[in-house]
Image (tube, rainbow, N blue to C red):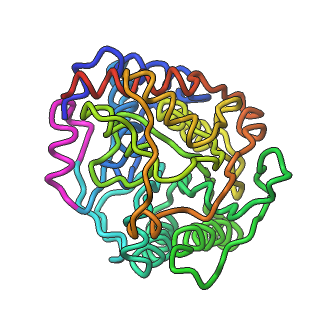
Amino acid sequence: MNLYKSKTYLDDLRVALAASVGIAEMKNKTILVTGATGTIGSFIVDMLLEYNKSGANITIFATSRNKERLEERFKVGKTDLLTYVTYDSLIPVEFVFSVDYIIHAGGNAHPAAFNADPVGTIRGSVVGTYNLLEYGRKHGVKRFCYISSGEVYGQGDMTVDSFDEDYSGYIDLLSPRSAYPMGKRAAETLCASYTKQYGLETVIVRPCHTYGPGITDSDSRAHAQFIRNVLNGDDIIMKSQGTQRRSYCYIADCASAILTCLIKGESGKAYNSANSGASISIARLAQIIASCAGRKVVFAEPDISDLANRTPIAKQVLSSAKLEALGWEGKYSVEEGVAHTLTILRGEL
C-alpha cells in the first residue's frame, strides 16, 4: 500500500504533527511502536517518518508478528531511521536495543478477532503488556504509553452525557466477549502498578472508535465494514437499527492525541482520545459514509455471525476535557474524516 502518493494523506500527517503538543521533545529520541501495521500504529509511524523529513532524527522501531506485513506497509517510506522488528507479545522481550519511548498499540482490536480467540485476546493484553513493561523497566525507558480502549467503560449509564476518565461502567465478567475490555482494564492497572512500584512513567490513552485509511481487510468493526462497502461500489447494509451512540475520531486526531499524552500526560493517569462534537449514532455514521460515496443505506436481518459480533454497549461517548486541558485540539469533524478516508483509499484502489 503506497499511501505516500496521496496528497490528502501527507497533509493529514502534517496536520497531526502540528496538533501534537510538545512534539519537539521527541527530536533525537528513539521510540518503539507495537502493532505498527494496525490503524493507529501505522499512522503514528508515518507521522514520525514525516517529522524526520524536517531533521527530527527520531529512531523508530516498528513491530509486528509478521515482518512481511511491515515491509509491505512501509517499503516506500523506509529510511535508515526505521527498523522492522518481528515481535510476539506473549514471548518475553529480548530486544538488543534500548528506547526512550514505547507506544504499545498491538493486540486484537475488533469483534471477530476477540470473539474467535477470547483467551488469546486477554492473554495478549495482560501478558503482552507485562513483557513490555518489564523491558521498559530493565532498559530505562523514559515513558511507556499504553493504548487501551473506550470499551473499558463497559455498558455505561445512558443518563450520563459522556464518560470521563473516572467513570466505571458494568462489564459482564462471564461473557467471553469481555476478554477484550477486561484485558484492557487489567493492563491499565498493570501500568499504574509499574509506576507506583518501580517508578516507570506510564500514561494510558483510551481511544474512542477510530477510523481512517489504515483499516485492514479483517477489521470487523461497523465503520470498517461500511467503508469497504462503499469502496466496492455497494450500498451499506445495516444489520441493526444503529441506535447505539459512539464517539468517532479520525486517525489523524487520534494519533496527535496519543503523542500529546505520551509527551505531556501525567504519569500513572489515563486520557480519553475523543473529538468533542463528534458523537453520533451508528446509523448516522452509515448515512455520512453512504452520502459521501453516493450510495445509500439499506437494512437487512442479521445472521448468526452478526449477532455474535454485536456489542452490548448502547452508548460509548467519551469526554475529551482532560485531553484538551493538555492543550490538544481535534481538527476533523466526522464528515471531514470520512471524506479524507474515502479520498485516500480511492486513490489506492
| Vertical arrangement, residue 219 with respect to residue 326, above or below | below
Above or below — where is 235 with respect to 127? above
In the rendered view, tell whether residue 115 sits above or below residue 322.
Answer: below
Extreme residue toward the right, this view: 159
Can the viewer see residue 108? no
- Image quadrant for the C terminus? top left
Horizontal side of residue 202 vs 50, given as left or right:
right
In the rendered view of the protein, which quadrant contains the N terminus? top left
Q: Which of 340 and 197 is in front in this view?
A: 340
Q: Where residue 292 sits in the image (x, y, percent)?
A: 43, 21
Residue 64 horizontal/vertical position (percent): 28, 57
Q: In which quarter of the image is residue 187?
A: bottom right
Q: Does the magenta stretch include residue 75?
A: yes
The question of residue 274 being in magenta is answered with no
Left or right: where 49 falls relative to 102: left
Which quadrant of the view contains residue 144? bottom right
- Which percent across, then down, holds residue 320? 72, 38
The residue depicted at 70 percent of the width and 58 percent of the height is 268
Q: Nearer the viewer, residue 41 or 141?
A: 41
Q: Where is residue 242 in the image (x, y as percent from the top left)?
A: 57, 47
Above/below status of 197 relative to 241:
below
Q: How many labels does the image show?
A: 0
- Which portion, as a residue range, is magenta? 66-83
Between residue 87 and residue 53, name the one nearer to us. 87
Residue 327, quarter of the rendered image: top right
Q: Is residue 101 visible?
A: yes
Residue drawn at x 66%, y 37% is 279
Q: Which residue is drawn at 64% across and 50% down?
A: 244
Mainly helix, strand or loop, the magenta region? helix
